[in-house]
Structure formats: C-alpha cells, structure tokens
Amino acid sequence: MATLKTHVSLNVTDLHKSVTFYQAMFGVSPVKYKADYAKFDLANPPLNLTLELNPNMHSGGT
C-alpha cells in the first residue's frame, strides 16, 4: 500500500533563512534549491514542503 504524502507550499520573504531553518528542523537539505524556490521531499514524516520566495509579502493579521 502506498504511503500518502502531504504537500505544503509556503510563501517566504527570506528563502535562505527559511531553508536554513527547515534544514535544521528536518536534518536534510532540500532536493531542489533555486533562487526563488526550494523543495524538501521527506520520507518521515511523509511530506513534500515547498518554499517560494515572495519578498513583497507582509505579516498577517486583521
């Protein structure tokens, strides 16, 4: 039986800082790393995490 994998995409304002954070958290490097995009493909937990650079994004809130 195939394992289901969760896919999550996050917009980030600082790609390098975010990649550094998730590398430390997961203990692996991204499988893809471009100027505006990074992808982590994890087996445990089964997760496909993409980080997309959006430098114009503002902090949330209402």
Image (cartoon, rainbow, N blue to C red):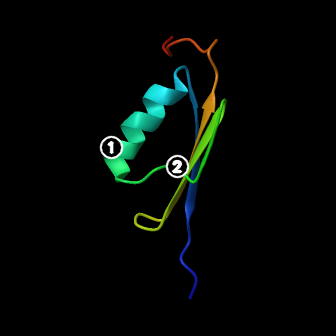
Residue that sits furthest to the bottom in the current view: 1
Q: Which residue is mark 2?
A: 30
How far separated are the C-alphas under marks 1 and 2? 11 Å
- Give the x, y percent position of residue 50: 59, 44
Instruction: Give the amino acid type for the residue marked by disc 1 in the picture.
Output: Ala
Q: Who is closer to the viewer here, 31 or 57?
A: 31
Callout 1: 10 Å neighbours few (<14), some, many (20+)? few
Residue pictured at 39% horizontal, 45% vertical: 23
- Residue 12 numbered tag: none
Q: Is residue 5 left or right of residue 19?
A: right
- Give the x, y percent position of residue 18: 46, 31
- Give the x, y percent position of residue 10: 57, 36
Q: Is residue 47 left or right of residue 54?
A: left
Q: Who is closer to the viewer here, 29 or 46?
A: 29
- Give the x, y percent position of residue 15: 54, 28
Q: Which residue is mark 1?
A: 24
